[in-house]
Image (cartoon, grey):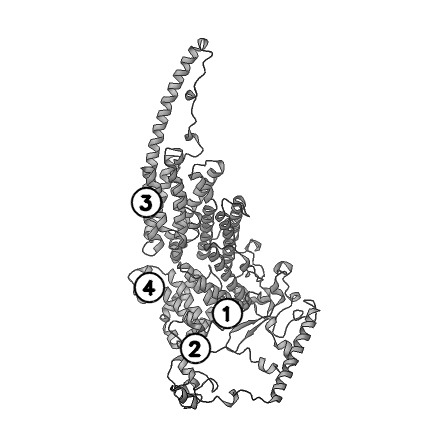
Amino acid sequence: MTSSSRSTGKRLPISCQACRTRKIRCSRDGRPCQTCVRRGLGAEDCIYLGQPRLSTEQPQSGDPNVQNELLSRIRNLEGLLQKQVNSQAGTPVGAPNSPLGALSATGSFSESDVGGGLDSWDFRSPMLGNIGNLHTSPSGHVRYVPLASQWESVVAKSPAAECLRDSDADIVDDDDLQIPLARNGNVSRAELLALLPPGRYCDNLKEVYFKVFSPIFHILHDLTFEAEYQQFCHDPGSVSTSWLALLFAILAIAISALNDDDPLLSDLGRERTVSRNIKALSARYRSAALRCLAADGVMTRHSINSLQALVLVSYARLHRGLPFWTLLGLTHHVAISMGCHIDPERFFLGPIEREERRRVWAGLMMLYTIQNTSFGSLEQQLLTQDVRMPADVDDIDLLNGPSVPTTSDPSSSPSSSRPTQMTYLLLNIRLHKLSNKICETIFTYPQPSRFSIAQLEAELMAFRELCDARYQVDTNPDPLPVHHQANLNILHSQVHQLVLLLLRPNLCRLLQGEITPETCDSRAKCMASAKAALSIFQNMLESSQFAPYKWYTSGLGSFNAFHAAVVLAVGLLNSESQAKFDETKEMLSKALDMFASLSVRSTFCSKAVPIIRQIIDSISTQYHQVQQQQQHQQQQSQVQLQSQQTQAQMFAALAPTMSNVTVPDSFMLPHSQSNSPVPTVASSSSDPTMQSSFAMSMHPQHWIGPTSVPWETLGSGMQYAFESDVV
C-alpha cells in the first residue's frame, strides 16, 4: 500500500481497472493480466490503482528544452495551416490546384469526371465543396472522411504527421455505446449462430424473401448475397458479424409470408395462434439482428451489410406496425458516416457496390418519407441529397460493368423492355412523394395549398398510366410473372387509397348537405375507387398464386380495403336507387367475410370486423327509414299538389271578379330537395349533427396508415352518427 492509501484508510482494489470496469474476473498476474491479453488489451490499458503507470505513460519532465521543442512544433504546425488556408482562398473550386480538380489518391472523382451532366447534380448544394474519401479498414468496415477532416494532406510534412497517421485505426474501445442495441451485453459468435433456425428452414425463409419481398424492397444485390450465403453454408466463420445481422433481418421479414399451415411456424414457434407465432418469430430474428450489429460495433464502425441490416430491420418494423423513428434516425446517421449521402460515382467503386449504395440510400429515404407523412412532418429538406436514384436494371445487368444503363426513371425505359427487379421500388418512391403532396394539401384544407386537388388528381392518373405502360398491361400478350402481377396490384391499390384520401374533403362537404357538381363528381370517383380497391383486395386474397402475399392482405392491403369499405358505406347513405343500394351492400358483406377470414392472422382485421358489421346494420336500418320518410313526403307532396291545382282552377273560374286579389305565397309550388342530382340523407328530416359527427370520424389524418386508425373513436363515433339519425 502507498502512503496515500494509508492516510485515507481505504483499501485499494487488487484487480485491474479494465476488468473491474467490465465486471469480469481478473487473473491478477501482471501487466497485462491474462484476461486483458485475451481481450486484446495491452499493458498501457491494464492499470492497477496504487501502482505507478508504465514509463511510457509517465508525464513529461519539466525540462525547458522539451517545452521549447513542443512550442516550436506548434508554431510550425500553425504556419503550415495558415499557408494552406491562404492558398485555398485564392484557388477556385475545380482548378488544377484544388483537391477536387483531379482524382485524389484515395479515389474521389472531380466534378468534371462524373459525367452526369448538370441535370444529375445540384451544384448549389454545399456538400459538393466538401467531397471526401472512403476509408476501408482491414476488417472491411467503411468510414467516410470529409475533405475538411483530412489533416494528413495539410501536415504531411510536419513533425505532427506521425501522431496523425494512426487516426484511421479501427475503434475497439469497449465502451457503453452498445447499450441501445444489446440488453444482455456482449455475445460470442457461437451464441449468435445458435439463434439461427435449422438449415432447411433457413434455406426456405431465404428463398421466400427473395421470391416475395426482394422485388418489392430491392435494396440488395441478390446474386452477391446468394454467393455469400453459399459460402456461409460451407464455412459459417467466413462471413462477418454484420452479414449475420443482414441474414437475421431477412429471416424476420420472410416469416410473415409463410402460409398458416407451414410446419416452420409450429416447429419454431410456441404460441397458440398463427399471428402470435409470426409476431414472436419475427421479433426473435429482429432482436438477433440487432445483437449481431451490437457485437459488430455498429455504433462506431460500419459496413454496407450493417447498413442494409438496419434498413431491413426498420422495414420489418414498418410492416409490423411498430415504431421505428429512433432506429431510422440511427440508420440515417450510419449511412452518412459511410458517405452514402454522396453519389458513389465520385468514388473508386465497382458497378455493383455503386448500385448497392444507391439502393440502400433510396430505401432509407423512402422509409423517411413514409414516416414523415405519418408524423405530419412534411419538411423535405432532409430528403434533398446529391445521390442519383438506382438504375432501373436487373441484378444480372450489373455484372456487365460499364454497359449498365444509367437511367433511373421508369418512364424513360424502352417501351419494349419488361419491368426489372428495381421497377417497383422506383415507382413506389415516386408514389410516396406524390402521397406527401396529397397529405400536405388535405392537412391544410380548407386553407390554400401549393397544390390544387385537380392538379394532384391528374398526377395520380398519370402515375397509374405510367404503371400500366411499364408493366405492359395492354401491349404484352404474355402474362407477367406472379411477383410483377402482385406488385402492380399493390401499386393500383395504393393509387385508389390516395384518390379516396385526396377527395375526402369534397366527400365530407357532400355529407354535410353541400350538393354541387364538384362534390357529386368527387362522390362518384370515390365510389369507383373504393369498388376497385375491394376488387384488388379480393383478388389478392382469394387467388392461389398470391398466397405468399398474405402479409400484405392482412396488413396494408386490409387497411386500404377497410378505407374503401367505409367510403362505400357513405355511398349507401345516398344511393341513387334500390339496385345500387343492394349491389353496394353485397360488396360490403363480401368485405366483411374477407376480413373475418383474416382475423386469426391479422389484428387489424379482427378490429375491422365489428366496425364493418356495425356499419352495415346501422346503414341498412337507416336507409329503409329514409326511404319510408321520402315516400311519405312524396305522398304529401302529391296531395298538396292536387289541392293547389284544384284551388288554381277555382281562382281561374273567379278571375273576372277577383282580378285585384293576389295569390298567397303559401300556395306557390315548393322546391323539393328530392330533385337534387344525388339524393342524400341530409335532404331528409334527419338530424344535421349526424352528418357532422360522421364526417369528423372520417378525418383525413386518421387514414394515413394502419396505425393511424382511431378504433375507439371510430366505433363510438359511427354508432352515435348512425343511431342518432335512426332515433
Residue type at mark 2 is: Gly
Q: Are marks 1 and 2 in contact (CB under 8 Å)?
A: no
Distance in Å between CA atoms under marks 4 and 1: 31 Å
Q: Residue drawn at (46%, 57%), measured in percent from left and top?
A: 371
N-term mark: 4 or 2: 2
Task: Look at mark 4 in the image and give the residue it sits on.
Answer: 265
Q: Nearer the viewer, residue 257 or 458?
A: 458
Residue type at mark 4 is: Leu
Q: Position of residue 358 (x, y in %)?
A: 54, 64
Distance in Å between CA atoms under marks 3 and 2: 58 Å
Q: Is residue 185 visible?
A: yes
Q: Which element type, helix, strand or loop, lies under badge 1?
A: helix
Few, some or many C-alpha atoms within 10 Å of disc 2 (few <14, some 14-19, many ≥20)?
few
Q: Are marks 4 and 1 in contact (CB under 8 Å)?
A: no
Q: Nearer the viewer, residue 202 or 327?
A: 327
Distance in Å between CA atoms under marks 3 and 1: 50 Å
Distance in Å between CA atoms under marks 4 and 3: 34 Å
Which numbered disc covers residue 304? 1
Task: Look at mark 3 in the image and give the residue it sits on.
Answer: 614
N-term mark: 3 or 1: 1
Q: Quadrant of residue 655?
A: top left
Few, some or many C-alpha atoms within 10 Å of disc 3 (few <14, some 14-19, many ≥20)?
some
Q: Residue drawn at (37%, 65%), measured in percent from left and top?
A: 283
Choose mark 3 or mark 1, whichever is in front. 3
Is 597 placed above or below 400 here? above
Is 410 placed above or below 509 here? below
Which numbered disc covers residue 237? 2
Q: Position of residue 468 (x, y in %)?
A: 50, 50
